[in-house]
Structures are given as C-alpha cells and as structure tokens.
Amino acid sequence: MDLKKLSNPIWKRSDNLRDPSVWKSADGYHLFYSRYSNNDWTKPENWSIAHVITKDFVTFEEDRDISAKGFASPGDVIRWKGKYILPYQSYPEVPTMLCYSTSDDLENWSKPVFFLEEAVHLPWNQANRVIDPTFVTEGERLHCFFVGTDRVHYASATNLVGHAYTDDPELKEWTITTVDSPLIGTCEDGPDGAENVTVFRNNNEWVMIYSEGLKSQHLAYITSKDLIHWGNKGKITIPEQSWMSTRYGAPYVWKEDEYWVMILMGEDRNSHTTFGLLTSKDGIIWEALSE
C-alpha cells in the first residue's frame, strides 16, 4: 500500500458504506463492511454484511454481500481454532442480537451463529438490542466488546459499551464483566454514550479507540493492561475533511510496517457515508490522508 498515491475518501459508492473492518492477508486486504441502501434504516432488506478485496486501496474487486439481508456491523476478524471468525449483528429488527460466521478461506462464510444472548437482559440495556461486537484474542481466551442501549435513564437513547469473555472453544459459555454497569458510559463530550470499538495491542498495553457520542460523533481512546480494567481516557482530534464534515466513527486499526493505519467511516453534509484512512506512529495521535 503506497499512501502517497491515496487521498480521502479512499472508497465511496452509491450505497452508504458503514462499519469497516480489515483483514490483511498475502493476497491483499479483505475489507468487510455494512452495506446500507435506500436511506431507510427500518427495513432489514436495506442492510447486509459485504466484502471486497483490494491490494492498494485504489482498486476494489469482487464486491459482494456475504450475509443475508438484515445483518450489519462486522467486527474484527480473528483466527480461532483453525477457522476465521467474523462477528456481527442482526439489524434492525428487535431484539437485535450478536452473531458470528466462520470461514476456512475468508470467501465462503457460514450462516450466522447467535451468541451472548444474555446480554440483551442486562440492567443497563433496556432496549432489547446488542450491537457492534468486537472480538479480541488473548491466548486461549476470547474477549467480546459490545454495545447496548439505555432508553430509561437518559433524555434520549444512549449507547453504552459492555464486555464479556469466554474460555469455551465453542463460544457458548460467557462471563460478562459489566453486568451492573457498562465499561464505557456517558461523559461531557459524549452525553449520548459510545459505540463501535476497535482494540489493538500497542507495545505493553491494549488501546481501545471508539466512537464517542452519537449526534456529535468523534473518536476517543482508553488503555488497559488486561482487557478488563480500563483507564487513561483521551480524545482523538482529527482535522476536518469534507467527507466526514457531519460526524465520523466506526474505526478499525491495524499495523502496517512501522506505523498504524485506521480506516474510518465519515458522513458528509448530504448524509452519505464513505471510508477514509489515517495513520499514526504511536496509535494515539492520528493524521488523515489529504483529500
């Protein structure tokens, strides 16, 4: 990938491109995303998990849906017990549930397997929806970060981040560490909560970058030594560009040689969403490609 040949947004379509996730392989970059069509959030037929391959983020090939309609928000692809696993969610019908598909080759994916269904009933999640799953592996343990919605204790619907882990190879038995309260709640910069997290290992600590706020969405980060206890919160400031002038979020981060790369969803003044790229030397301070 030659960043000098790229400019933001790096990919745009007539469909709204949302929730990007990248798996880097020997044959290129596998980009997974939510395809949202027809500008009607309420209809399942307008949502699907899509997949495209690119070698350089200039040319995108084999763009296709890999799920049935009514699914969205692909998380981090992981390698687990000899298979690739891609987490995502049913959407938008309630209850919104977490699920995953498995693959041997990153091309052919199984039907959705639903998991962590008990998260629907957490006391801070009264909306019957669990969304935005992110998988992180740590040895033989698999962590899942997810989002629930509180419509009771706040003036408007508020998204909150939860956490669970499993040592079960079948991904059926989970321990939820955020039963009584969420991992990430509200704050002055995000009075309506948070969503869409990405987690990566940076030297001796874990870094989580997430979408802070819903109406005025931007990026924030927190760090951890063990994926359970988090602190050292900060805001990530990015120079405004036209493709993300209304709001931006849903980050995904991976390592590229000596620097980090983030793919980000941006919404412009016409409410259209596209993808752009940012780079960082330390995983905290980010610079966007030029437009």
Image (cartoon, grey):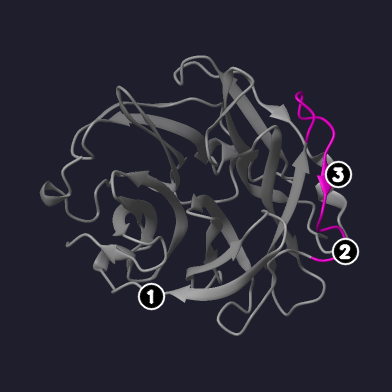
- Which of the two labelled residues, at mark 3 and mark 2, occupies the earlier sequence position? 3
Q: Which residue is mark 2?
A: 180
Q: Does 120 sit above or below residue 71?
A: below
Neighbourhood count class around disc 3 (C-alpha, 10 Å): few under 14, some 14–19, many 20 upward: few
> CA separation, marks 3 and 1?
36 Å
Amino acid type indicated by mark 1? Thr
Amino acid type indicated by mark 3? Glu
Front tag of 3 and 2: 2
> CA separation, marks 3 and 2?
13 Å
Q: Which residue is mark 1?
A: 237
Q: Does 279 sit above or below residue 245?
A: above
Q: Which mark is residue 145?
A: none
Front tag of 3 and 1: 1
Q: Name, please, the residue furthest toward the bottom.
A: 188
Q: Is residue 138 visible?
A: yes
Q: Which residue is mark 3?
A: 118
- The residue located at (55%, 69%) in the rendering is 214
Tell me the SS state at disc 3.
helix
In-front residue for pair 7/34: 7
Amino acid type indicated by mark 2? Asp
Q: Name, please, the residue furthest toward the front.
A: 204
Q: From the image, give the main secondary structure of the stretch colored magenta.
A: loop
* 40 sits left or right of 287 in the view: right
- The residue located at (37%, 45%) in the rendering is 255
Neighbourhood count class around disc 1 (C-alpha, 10 Å): few under 14, some 14–19, many 20 upward: few
In-front residue for pair 206/153: 206
Q: Is residue 216 visible?
A: no
Q: Does 86 sit above or below residue 117?
A: above
Is residue 288 highlighted in magenta? no
Are the residues tagged 3 and 2 within 8 Å (C-beta)? no
